[in-house]
Image (spheres, rainbow, N blue to C red):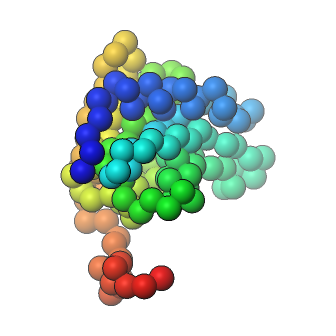
């Protein structure tokens, strides 16, 4: 598994903030995911007048990684323009758990070069996995 400097990954998440589309909440979020082979993919939140259709930054970043052929993440960083230590929501935690194990570090930006680190397992214990559904994740797609 690749490792990264959390500050560098957080910086990539911060860069994604500029592209956020947030006319309703005005709450910009950026995320960066590091794949097991060392590539970084970023995402920002994209709001919609029908709030349930909004895309979260973590989902957008994971989607970019999956679109590029990656199926495993090694680390995640999330930030907001407020630098308030935002953590992934429950839905995003489940999405991250689909592509990362419980030891994946999640770095939450608290500003001034500081962050809070969680493991994905801390954020979403006993997650739904292919195994709990009786699906072999290594089977041919």
| In the rendered image, the vertical position of residue 82 relative to residue 92, given as above or below | above
Asked if one can make out residue 19 in the rendered structure from this viewpoint, the answer is yes
Residue 109 position, x and y percent, is 38, 27
Report which quarter residue 127 is drawn in: bottom left
Q: Is residue 18 left or right of residue 119?
A: right
The foreground one among 84 and 68 is: 68
Asked if one can make out residue 85 in the rendered structure from this viewpoint, the answer is no
Q: Residue at x 37, y 26 (%)?
A: 8
Q: Residue at x 34, y 24 (%)?
A: 7
| In the rendered image, the vertical position of residue 100 relative to residue 41, given as above or below | below
Q: Residue at x 65, y 34 (%)?
A: 20
Residue 56 position, x and y percent, is 57, 47
Residue 55 position, x and y percent, is 62, 50
Residue 82 position, x and y percent, is 51, 21
The foreground one among 82 and 66 is: 66
Q: Is residue 53 left or right of residue 75?
A: right
Q: Is residue 12 left or right of residue 112?
A: right
Report which quarter residue 23 is drawn in: top right
């Amino acid at each position: 598994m690749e490792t990264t400097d959390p500050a560098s990954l957080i910086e990539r998440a911060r860069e994604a903030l500029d592209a956020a589309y947030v006319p309703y909440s005005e709450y910009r979020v950026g995320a960066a995911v590091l794949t097991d082979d060392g590539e970084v993919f970023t995402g920002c939140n994209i709001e919609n007048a029908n709030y349930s259709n909004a895309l979260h930054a973590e989902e957008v970043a994971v989607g970019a990684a999956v679109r590029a052929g990656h199926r495993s993440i090694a680390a995640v960083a999330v930030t907001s323009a407020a630098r308030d230590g935002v953590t992934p929501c429950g839905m995003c935690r489940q999405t991250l758990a689909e592509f990362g194990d419980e030891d994946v570090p999640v770095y939450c930006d608290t500003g001034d070069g500081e962050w809070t680190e969680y493991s994905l397992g801390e954020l979403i214990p006993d997650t739904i996995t292919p195994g709990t559904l009786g699906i072999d994740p290594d089977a041919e797609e």
